[in-house]
Image (cartoon, rainbow, N blue to C red):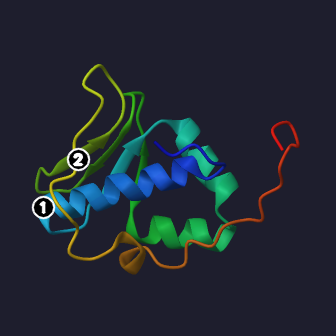
Amino acid sequence: MANGHDRNLVRLLLVVEGFRARYRRWPTRVRLDQGYIESLQRILSEVGFENLTSKLALVPDPEPGLHAEDDEGGRFSYGGGAGGGDHQDGESDIPVQSWLVGLEQRPYRSSGLFD
């Protein structure tokens, strides 16, 4: 599990890549808690967030976890609920970083609490 300052971005990339590995196509949206969206806005620069949302709709959803979906009924989940989410089916044929390009991050400023 990702636990760094950018953990929610890592989790988003994992759910998108898991969807790609399963269906061999990219999701059109990710359903996630509003707090995840706000976290992504803090992690990514304004341009990085625009690049992300130009490829992927971020849909606020109170259901726990992240859920990558498309209009053909495909769905891949990361975390949440008692089931914990899906397991990636093999490798993605195209790395997620090749599709979601330009995810520029803001400079990280540690709070100093855990340094």
Query: Which callout, 2 or 1, points at the residue further toward the start of the chain?
Result: 1
Residue drawn at point x = 36 percent, y = 70 percent: 96
- The image position of residue 73, as x and y in percent, is 12, 50
- The image position of residue 1, as x and y in percent, is 45, 42
- The image position of residue 39, as x and y in percent, is 62, 46
Residue 29 against residue 45 in the figure, above or below: above
Residue drawn at point x = 11 percent, y = 56 percent: 72
Label 2 crowding class (10 Å Cα cut-off): few <14, some 14-19, many 20+? many
Label 1 crowding class (10 Å Cα cut-off): few <14, some 14-19, many 20+? some
Q: In this view, does 11 lie to the left or right of 105?
A: left
- The image position of residue 68, as x and y in percent, is 29, 50
Q: What residue type is labelled 2?
A: Phe
Residue drawn at point x = 43 percent, y = 53 percent: 12
Q: Is 57 or 3 nearer to us in this picture?
A: 3
Helix, strand or loop at mark 2: strand
Give the numbered dot on residue 76.
2
Callout 2 touching callout 1 (CB < 8 Å): yes
Q: What residue type is labelled 1?
A: Tyr
Residue drawn at point x = 77 percent, y = 59 percent: 108
Q: Can see residue 28?
A: no
Q: Can see residue 83?
A: yes
Give the numbered dot on residue 98.
none
The residue that label 1 is drawn on is 23
Q: What is the residue that sits farthest to the front in this orientation?
A: 115
Q: What is the residue that sits farthest to the right in this orientation?
A: 112
Measure how far apart labels 2 and 1 are at the Cα level. Answer: 9 Å
Helix, strand or loop at mark 1: helix
Picture quarter with the C terminus: top right
Q: In this view, does 101 lie to the left or right of 7?
A: left
